[in-house]
């Protein structure tokens, strides 16, 4: 007898140790290997650098698989990872679902405060009014007292909101379930049965969720001593689970059926169902359910002190253990899942390091970009300053060249006044001096301008030509022609360019004629340009050179050079496109000057 007891104790301890080291139902129950499959999909998504939204959804699906195994702590971790990735996305469309599922599993773990916070987060991110209100009610429910009546109030509010919608079947199922659980805690069995039935109406009758609700209803019938109804319903559940469920669910429902038999003291039937459950678990290769069924059988045999059956069961279990483990796909899936988890953690670490490297690289690139921008800005400022100085220098040079022309004109004019006075022609001297002063005043007022209106230029040219006619009364006549298309108030002409050419025509050509000459000045439009033509019938350039002294020729050359230099400066400063041409007509019949510029 002692040997039997010792063997029983050893076997029981070995079985219990095996149950702790080989299998942990909350971690390893994995119907159809979905947990491992989902973890592999997550690993693939991370390794291939999928979008944050995609990785977040894979984490969420993995958490759902873990919730099915009641492994809430790991499911909580993976949901937090899903939220972490979804928060990096611009859309954040799935965040309300992730936060709500996280709050639910925290509620299942009695973490009411953090569950309330995450229901609140789900409310904050909800875009749909019904879902938002349900999340807010659940947040308030978690933050209220643990009084079950207070919780019922919030759940009933959710029920009223959901009843107005044709969708949200899963939410309705969860809500009715929670209400029924609280009804049970308050011994409101009729209300609990009613709400379990309502929950059953929200799910597919041929689903594991439906089986669970029916199982809860059967338990409720046992509590209310409706044994016959409970037995009938549980047999139906076992039959249905054999058709639609994995072996784990089948064995669990068979054990529940045996419990109902035992509650009615129908021991033989109960034991037979337990044996069938144990045999099914061995046959299908479920170590976990075989262990649980074995422990349940041994527990009943101990009450009857049937040590022979106990030892026989242990021997059978130990004999079948190796093949059982080999057949149990869930153990393989668990090992694969653990390996995949390790790979995922390593990938996450690599991703963090990679992101830090990318952030540092982006930071360095940004710094380099800013430095380049600053350098370009400095270069642009330097170039702009240089161009500004260059333009100012050109403006100064232009002003200087214009001022250079004034002394010559002033000298010639004063010389003419002196001639009038010397010849005792005081009246003509006064008249000349008066006209000269008005002309000089106009010229001085506009001396700092690069361009002036054509109307003002013509006025000054007429005054100048009148002065020259007073000086050389019998040497020339003149005419100024203006194209009808020209608006003299709008068209601008380069300042102090035309008058020196008129002066050259008079002083170096027309005044040497034996008879009266003619000076023609005409303005016309050619496309987008203004054309000025100055034509005289003087003695021409070559003959003029022969009549003049070296000093006079140098002065004339300097005058033309001054005009050309000012034209070059105006073209550089204003992009005026001014062209200047002096043509000596054939056979000493005079000179023709052409000046053309853009009509801005």
Image (spheres, grey):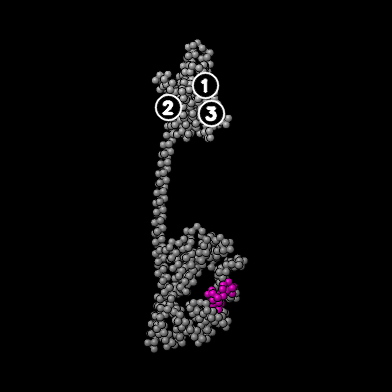
Q: Secondary structure at mark 1?
A: strand
Type of secondary structure dominating the magenta stretch: helix
Could you tell me how far apart the alpha carbons at marks 3 and 1 are, in whole angstroms?
17 Å
* Secondary element at tag 3: strand
Q: Residues within 10 Å of mark 2 (few under 14, many from 20)?
A: few
State which tag comes first along the sequence, 2 or 3. 3
Q: At 41% from the left edge and 44% from the top edge, which residue is drawn?
A: 376
- Judged left or right of residue 57, residue 134 is right
**Label 3, on which residue?**
523
- In the rendered structure, which segment of residues is drawn in magenta? 197-218
Q: Secondary structure at mark 2?
A: helix
Q: Residues within 10 Å of mark 3 (few under 14, many from 20)?
A: some
Q: Quadrant of residue 407?
A: top left
Q: What residue is drawn where x is 44% and y is 68%?
A: 40
Q: Which residue is more in the foreground, 362 or 178? A: 362
Name the residue beneath numbered marker 2. 561
**538 to 21, vertically: above or below:** above
Indicate the position of residue 147 as horizontal and vertical percent values: 55, 68
Q: Label 2 vs label 3: CA separation?
A: 23 Å
Q: Which mark is residue 459?
A: none
Q: Position of residue 35 (x, y in %)?
A: 46, 71
Q: Residue at x 51, y 20 (%)?
A: 517
> Residue 528 colored magenta?
no
Nearer the camera: disc 1 or disc 2: 1
| Residue 583 visible to an observer of this rendering | yes
Residue under circle 1?
518
Q: Earlier in the sequence, mark 1 or mark 2?
A: 1
Across and down, in percent, residue 516 comes to 51, 18
């Amino acid at each position: 007898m002692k040997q039997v007891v010792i063997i029983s104790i050893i076997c029981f301890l070995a079985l219990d140790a095996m149950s702790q080291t080989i299998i942990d139902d909350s971690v390893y129950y994995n119907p159809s290997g979905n947990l491992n499959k989902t973890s592999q999909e997550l690993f693939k998504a991370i390794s291939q650098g999928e979008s944050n939204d995609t990785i977040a959804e894979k984490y969420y699906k993995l958490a759902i698989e873990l919730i099915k195994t009641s492994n809430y702590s790991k499911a909580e971790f993976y949901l937090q990872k899903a939220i972490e990735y979804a928060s990096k996305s611009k859309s954040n469309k799935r965040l309300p679902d992730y936060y709500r599922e996280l709050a639910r599993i925290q509620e299942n773990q009695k973490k009411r405060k953090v569950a309330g916070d995450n229901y609140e987060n789900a409310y904050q991110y909800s875009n749909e009014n019904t879902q938002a209100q349900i999340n807010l009610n659940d947040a308030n429910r978690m933050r209220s007292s643990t009084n079950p009546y207070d919780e019922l109030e919030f759940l009933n509010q959710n029920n009223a909101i959901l009843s107005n919608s044709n969708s949200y079947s899963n939410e309705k199922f969860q809500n009715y379930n929670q209400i029924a659980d609280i009804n049970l805690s308050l011994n409101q069995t009729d209300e609990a049965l009613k709400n379990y039935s309502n929950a059953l109406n929200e799910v597919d009758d041929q689903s594991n969720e439906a089986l669970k609700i029916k199982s809860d209803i059967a338990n409720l019938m046992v509590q209310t001593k409706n044994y016959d109804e409970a037995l009938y319903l549980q047999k139906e559940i076992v039959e249905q689970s054999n058709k639609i469920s994995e072996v784990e669910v089948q064995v669990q429902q068979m054990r529940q059926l045996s419990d109902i038999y035992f509650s009615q003291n129908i021991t033989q039937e109960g034991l037979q169902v337990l044996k069938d459950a144990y045999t099914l678990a061995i046959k299908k290769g479920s170590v976990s359910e075989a262990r649980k069924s074995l422990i349940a059988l041994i527990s009943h045999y101990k009450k009857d002190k049937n040590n022979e059956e106990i030892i026989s069961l242990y021997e059978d279990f130990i004999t079948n253990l190796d093949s059982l483990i080999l057949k149990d796909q869930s153990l393989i899936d668990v090992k694969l899942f653990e390996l995949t988890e390790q790979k995922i953690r390593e990938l996450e670490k690599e991703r963090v390091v990679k992101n830090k490297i990318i952030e540092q690289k982006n930071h360095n690139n940004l710094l380099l970009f800013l430095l380049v921008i600053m350098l370009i800005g400095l270069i642009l400022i330097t170039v702009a300053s240089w161009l500004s100085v260059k333009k100012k220098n050109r403006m100064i040079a232009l002003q200087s060249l214009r001022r250079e022309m004034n002394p010559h004109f002033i000298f010639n004019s004063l010389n003419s006044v002196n001639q009038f006075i010397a010849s005792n022609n005081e009246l003509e001297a006064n008249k000349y001096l008066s006209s000269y002063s008005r002309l000089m005043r106009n010229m001085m007022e506009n001396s700092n301008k690069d361009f002036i209106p054509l109307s003002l230029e013509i006025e000054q040219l007429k005054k100048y030509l009148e002065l020259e006619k007073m000086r050389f009364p019998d040497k020339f006549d003149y005419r100024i022609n203006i194209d009808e298309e020209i608006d003299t108030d709008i068209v601008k002409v380069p300042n102090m360019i035309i008058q020196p050419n008129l002066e050259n025509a008079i002083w170096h050509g027309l005044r040497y004629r034996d008879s009266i000459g003619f000076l023609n000045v005409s303005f016309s439009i050619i496309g987008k340009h203004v054309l000025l033509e100055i034509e005289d019938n003087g003695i021409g350039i070559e003959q003029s050179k022969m009549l003049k002294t070296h000093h006079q020729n140098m002065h004339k050359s300097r005058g033309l050079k001054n005009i050309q230099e000012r034209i070059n400066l105006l073209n550089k400063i204003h992009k005026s496109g001014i062209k200047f041409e002096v043509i000596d007509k054939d056979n000493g019949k005079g000179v023709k000057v052409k000046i053309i510029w853009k009509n801005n």
